[in-house]
Structure formats: structure tokens, C-alpha cells
Amino acid sequence: MINPLLSNFLLPPFDKITNDCMIPAIKITIQNSKTKINKILNKYKHNYNWENFCQYILELNEHLYRIFSPINHLYYVCNNNKIRKNYEIILKMITNYNIWIIQNIHLYNAYIKIQDNQDNLNLNELQIESLNNIIRDFKFSGILLSQEKKKTYTGYVTDLLKLQNIFNNNILDSTQKLEKNILDKKKLNGVPKHIIDFMHKNALLKNKEGYLITFDFPIYSSIITFCKNDVLRKKVYYMYNTRASSLDQNTSQFNNEPIIIKELSLRLKLSKLLGYHSYAEKSLVMKSAKKVDKVLSFLYKLIKLSKKQAEKEVFDLKHFIKKKYNLVKINPWDIAFFSEKFKFYLYGIDDNIIRDYFPIDIVIKGMFHIINKIYGLFFKQRKVPVWHENVMFFDIFNSKNQLYGSIYFDLYMRPEKRSGAWMDICQTRILKKNGTIQYPIAYINCNFTPSFNKIFLLNHNEVLTLFHEFGHALHHITSKINIPNISGINGIPLDIVEFPSQFMEYWGWETESLKLISQHYKNKNVIPKNIMNNLVKSKKYNAALLLMRQIELSLFDIRIHKEFNLNKKNQILDLIQEIRKDLVTISPMPIWYKYTNIFNHIFGGEYAAGYYSYLWAEQLAADSFLYFKKNGLFNQTIGKKFLNNLLSLGSSKDPIILFKNFRGKELNINSLLIQRGINYN
């Protein structure tokens, strides 16, 4: 029987992929790649060129990724014990193969020969950029270290990837095991009806009475924001924010605290091995900001510019709570609840009413319409093999009916699915040696609340989440670069990669856009003008306080990776408390608040010493969007300029240069503040 992952598939055969076919497919592909690479190293020796060497290896690497990608994706969206065991083995195989590549001195020397001879070989600009990036990655991965130090490097990298995997599994396992059964519906007063219905169905599915609280974010957020029962809010807040820690006896086996220390220690050792003083210094070399001090200066400048407004926001909220509820002390588990009450007082915004105007099919249709009006692109749904019945697949075309790429949408939460929202690569655009083009494909993953009556409604924050991930996907699938390591989002500096996603979010705040993405699920009316106007105004609500929270996470990340010292006890807690002294907050966080234990961006993903990227990239996003807003929100001339001269060029040129070419100006922190509605004067 043919292994479905080894068949010559155009799209991943998700309907045929089994746990048993995963490891053999990766093993065979890696063995074949090694054999072929060794063969061309011996065959051409002193006659390496782009076609017989660079192109050949790029195609081998993309072929391996196309086989690994569906396995990697299923691990995140259909997680179970069997696939988890497979994934651990496969991750080790992939890691070892990547190390074999990146520490192969014969490969490195071959690339150097091509680089030295690039003029005679008539390499074009894109080929030179691709080659330079490949050689940079070799040097950054210790290719010039001694054999003994290379072995040490391999050990560090392997252990780090293993720890990150454990970190993510601990979050998933601790979240899955947490639940709270509520028998008395009155204790849930204030919680939206659709969430109460969902919790009731949860209870029935587990043969329980009443209502079962699980700790998926939509459930947690609804209780902490709307539930009138402060005792329940406190309990749920505590359970949620002590996940993957030693504080909950039911899930203490999933404690991430020792994992964090091991990761920080290994990252520091790895950095010093490569000649850097800290992991932050090492990380910034590959990012747009370049220097740690530049990032710190940027973050502290944001504090300075937004502090006055943040203080006013705290004062106004506390004044409202004192006047309306006669409360002076505000506990952390009360903040979201009273903030929502104040928001309703100011703008009349009620999420439960707004949801009725955002059926997900209308939102998606409207989102596609917006992209058509900006860039002239079209979307066509197609039935393809998928991993779950709710998954949708769309092809994207230009006005000449030429294919750009495709996107999978997996939008609803499931127990076996990783929490949060993210975009991932299925495959990258490449012009193959045989003349055929492989078109890019992306995955969009969210965790919206599923519906038992098949009426899927979103709140406005969920609309923005969808727009955000869609922005990432567009960045990848609109690429016109045919070399995979510089195509789509590949090779984009991490502190730039959030630019198109945050840019896309802004369209969810404009009345012209809201008209296109809203329609009452019953009477089909567009969202009323007064609600729409108030929703747009509410964007500025607590804008400075929300910024403070992002700054706190960014400062913790960059500073812990700059200052980490294994000999310092309680360094994490001490650093958090020191950072908070400079910030404006509504209420001090309790000592048991363990957000670091679930901070998977930096301890389970790629954002270590890079979480500041969201704010850094927001400067580009805000400035670009303000350019549209000034010249017409759906100005297709500007839209096509943005698409053709920035979005579709991947990392073929420095993204900052592309941005300057598009805007005709330097990056400016003020655009971020203006777009957020923060008065910085």
C-alpha cells in the first residue's frame, strides 16, 4: 500500500493520513534527501551553480517540509497520545536532519564557492539574496565552530526543541484537565446565553448535571468579563492563571516553572557558544531592530508617551466603580468585569447584541469583499480533503483568474486543539526546475465557540482575531517570489512579520468595512449606525492600559533573555515586579499569577526575545493604514501598490526599505499611538 504522505499529492491527503504512515514518510524522505545531497556534492565539486546545487537543495527542503507540514498541523489541531508520541520522534528526526544540513562543512563550502563566483554565474538579485540568507544561517548556526563545540551546539538545540514541546504539551494537558461543574444556574448570572448553553452541552457530553466550565479562552473570558458572581470569578481566575504551575494539585505534574529555567539556561549557553553575551543579543541580530538597547529604548519611550493617558484611564474607571458600585478596592478578577460595565456605560456596547450582527459566513464573505476592493483579488471555495468537517478551503485568484494560492480555515475550538489563534505554512511558492509552479498554501486556525444549532456568531474581538490571522495568510499566499526561502513569510524578520496581520486588523474598525462584514443573523439588517459608530469610538477605550500590558510582556521577554543568571533566585518574579513599577495598572497582580507558565509565544514558540515584535511591527501597520485612510479606504491604486511593492515581495529585500519605498518616509512611533487613539502630547 502506498504511503499517502509519499504520494505525489497536490494537497495534503488529510482523509488518508494515519498515525502509522507519519514516521516512515519522514524517515524515507530524510534518507533520500541525504543521499541526493551527498551525490550532488560529489558529482559537481568545483562546478557548482544555481541550477545544479542551490535550486536542487531548495526543492529537496521544500519537498520534506510539504510532508512534515500536515503532520505538524495535525499535532496542533488533532492532538492525542499517539500523534504526540509520533511527533516527538519526528521532531527529533527533523532536528537532526536540519543540524546535519546546517553543520555540513561541505555544503557550506559549496555555497561559499557559488557566492564567490556569483558574477561569473550570472546570479540575479533574488538568487543572490537567497544565497546570502543561506550562508548567514550557516554562520549563525555554528558552522565555523570546532567539532567538539558543534556537538555541544547540537545538544543545546535538540534539548531546547524538546523542552519547548514539553512546555506546549503541559499547557494543553493542564487546560484539558481543568474543569468546574456548576449545578445552580443562578451562579452564572450575567454570562452570555450561548456560553451557558455550551457549558450545559459540555456537562451532558460528560454525563454530568448542570453546567461544565472548561478553560478554553472563550469560556474563561466570558465568565471573567460577564459573570456577576465575584466568588466564581475569583475561582475561575485563579484556576486559569495557575495552569501549568505547581499551585494546582490536580495539574501540578504539568508544572512549567522548571522547564522555563532550563530553557533560559540553555539559550544563554547557546548564545555564549556562538560568541554573544546574551540570548537577546543573539536573537536581535536576525531582527530588524538589531540592538537590544534600541528595543528597550523603544519600549520605555512608549511608556513615557502613553503613561499620562493610562493614569487618566485608571482614574476614570475607579471613579466609575466607586460612584456606581461603592467599591474602592478592585481585585484582579474584577477588572474585566467592571471594565466591561464602564465600557457599556460610555458607549452602550454589548457583546451579546453585537454578536448577532457577525455571523461567521457573513464576516468571511465581507472580509473577502474588502480584499477584492483593496487588491482586486477573488476567493473561490473548493471541497478538498480536510481533518475536520468544519474546515473550509479557498483558492485566491487575481482579476485575470490567475491563481495566487490557497487557505485552509479551521475556526472553532475543540478539546484536542491547541488554544489561541495562529497562521501556519502548508507549502511555499516555488518555481521548480521542471518549470512548474508550486503555489503557496496557508492554514488559519482560531478557537471560536462552536455552535450546536449551526448558527456561528462572532464577537468583535473574534472578528479582529480572524482578520489578524488572515493578514498573515495573505502575506504568504500573495507572494510572487519563486525562491522558497525568501518567498511568502519565509525569511521575514520576526519583528516585521506581524506588520500585515496588524494592518489587516484595522479594517475591522472602520464603518465602511463594518457595513460589509455585518448582517443580523435573523432579520438580515446591517449593524445599526448608532451601534456601529459607538463600536468604532470604543476602540480608544483603555487604549493606553492595553498598551501597558503589551509593554509589560515585551519588557519581561527581552529583559529576561538579556539579564538571565542561573545563580539568581526568584529572578523571574523579581523582574516582573521591577518592570511593573514603571507601568500604570488598575490593580497589582497577586504573587500566584503565573502568566509566564503559559507564555507559549516565548517558551513554546519562536518569539523568545522577540515579543516586542508586535509593537515594533505595529508602527509599520499603523502608518500604512493611515496612508489608506487619508487617501480613501478602498483606494485600489494604493492597494495594488501595497500588494505589488511590499506584500508580495516576501524577504527578497529588506522590509524596512520596502516600507520606506511604499510610504516615502521613515518609521515613526507616533503612527502607532495615533491609530490606537492615544494622546501623546
Image: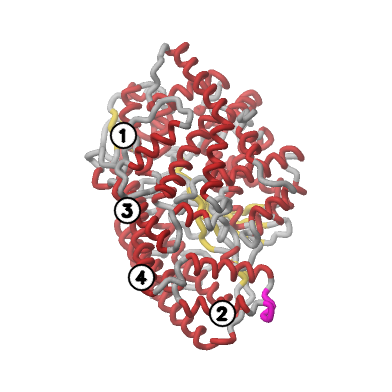
Q: Amino acid at mark 2?
A: Phe
Q: Is residue 558 located in the magenta-colored stretch of the structure?
A: no
| Alpha carbons under labels 1 and 3: distance apart | 21 Å
| Alpha carbons under labels 2 and 4: distance apart | 27 Å
Q: Amino acid at mark 3?
A: Lys
Position of residue 126 measured from the top left corner of the image (x, y, whole percent): 66, 68
What stretch of residues is rendered in magenta?
119-123
Q: Cβ–Cβ below 8 Å for labels 1 and 3? A: no
Q: Residue at x 36, y 55 (%)?
A: 165
Q: Mark 3 or mark 4: which comes first in sequence?
A: 4
Please, what secondary structure does the residue beneath circle 1 have? Answer: loop
Frontmost of labels 1 and 3 is: 3
Q: Residues within 10 Å of mark 1 (few under 14, many from 20)?
A: few
Q: Mark 2 or mark 3: which comes first in sequence?
A: 2
Frontmost of labels 2 and 4 is: 4
Q: Mark 2 or mark 4: which comes first in sequence?
A: 2
Reading the image, the residue beneath label 4 is 151
Rendered view: 322 above or below 130:
above
Please, what secondary structure does the residue beneath circle 4 have? Answer: helix
| Alpha carbons under labels 3 and 4: distance apart | 19 Å
Reading the image, the residue beneath label 3 is 262
Please, what secondary structure does the residue beneath circle 3 have? Answer: helix
Q: Cβ–Cβ below 8 Å for labels 1 and 2? A: no
Q: Quadrant of the C terminus?
A: top right
Rendered view: 272 above or below 505:
below
Q: Which mark is residue 592?
A: 1
Reading the image, the residue beneath label 2 is 53
User: What is the magenta segment's predominant secondary structure?
Assistant: loop
